[in-house]
Every structure is written in structure tokens, then in C-alpha cells.
Amino acid sequence: METARSSGLKDQVRSNWSNVALICRKCSKKLDGGFGPGGGERLAKALRKHLSLKKGRKAAAGIVEVNCLGICPRGAVTVVDGAASRDWLLVRPGADLDELAEALGLNVAPHP
Ligand code: FES
């Protein structure tokens, strides 16, 4: 059997992510905001702020904007839960970010 090294895979890099949410960037742009306290933020940014998440692999969870996922819903943002990739979410503007974080398994400390 081939080892990871002999098959050309690189060494691993650790992250602190408990889970990752993939959020469609294009859906977010089309909505032009819709989330956060004033309703003027993109979903990824609003969610990151709401959960007090830093950026990058040292954060407690990953919120990553990705290219179009091919669903292109009207008036919603396509979101993939990294741990439950068979059921994608279509998140409408003004969605409750606590509920969304729970649905996505982003079990980080709730905001104050
Ligand atoms: S624009 Fe978001 S899924 Fe296509």
C-alpha cells in the first residue's frame, strides 16, 4: 500500500475549526447585504462577527466564501455545512444567526 508521502501528499496542517461553513460569494453579492444587526452585511461577515470568529485556521470555526455552488436561489444564499454536506441550506436575508450557527454546528461560544 502506498503511504501518503510516496503518493505525493504533503504533510498536514492543523486548524482549530470545529466545523466549516461554505457560503456562496455570488449569492451574497446579489443580495448586497441582508444580514447582521443593521441588515447591511454579507452573510459570511455577519456570521463571523456574530460568533466573534477570527479569520483563518486559528479561528474556532471556518466561515469560507466560495464560488457559485450551482443552485443560485432567488433572494437567498446557498450554504454548505462541511459536516453535513448532503443537505445544503438556502438562507434568506434577516435569518436568525444563532439558529443558523446551531444548524451549521458552529458550536463556538455565543456572542455576549
Ligand atoms: S449564485 Fe450562489 S449558488 Fe449560484
Image (cartoon, grey):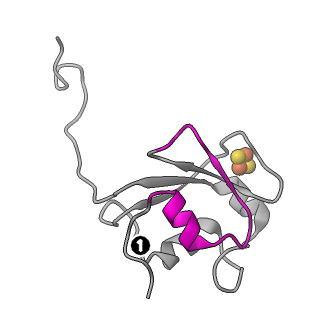
Q: Is residue 12 above or below residue 96?
A: above
- Please state which amino acid type lies under the numbered disc 1: Leu
Q: Quadrant of residue 92?
A: bottom right
Magenta highlight range = 84-105
Residue drawn where x is 44% and y is 45% of the image:
83
Residue at 63% x, 72% y: name it: 96
Q: Position of residue 63 (x, y in %)?
A: 48, 60
- Residue 45 appears in the rendering: no
Task: Tell me the quarter of the picture where residue 95 sits.
Answer: bottom right
For the N terminus, the quadrant is top left
- Residue 37 lies, in percent from the top left, at 65, 85
> How many numbered discs sit on the rendered protein?
1
Residue at (18% x, 14% y) in the render: 2
- Tell whether position 95 is magenta: yes
In the image: residue 3, left or right of residue 74: left
Q: At numbered mark 1, what does the secondary structure look like: helix, strand or loop? A: loop
> Closer to the camera, 111 or 11?
111
Give residue 100's position: percent from left, percent from top.
Answer: 57, 64
**Residue 55 position (above or below residue 86):** below
Between 25 and 43, the one nearer to me in the picture: 43
Percent position (x, y) of residue 104? 51, 57
Q: Is residue 32 left or right of residue 57?
A: right
82 sits left or right of 24 in the view: left
The residue at 46%/75% (across/down) is 51
Q: Which residue is mark 1?
A: 53
Q: Quadrant of the C terminus?
A: bottom left
With respect to residue 104, does 4 lie above or below?
A: above
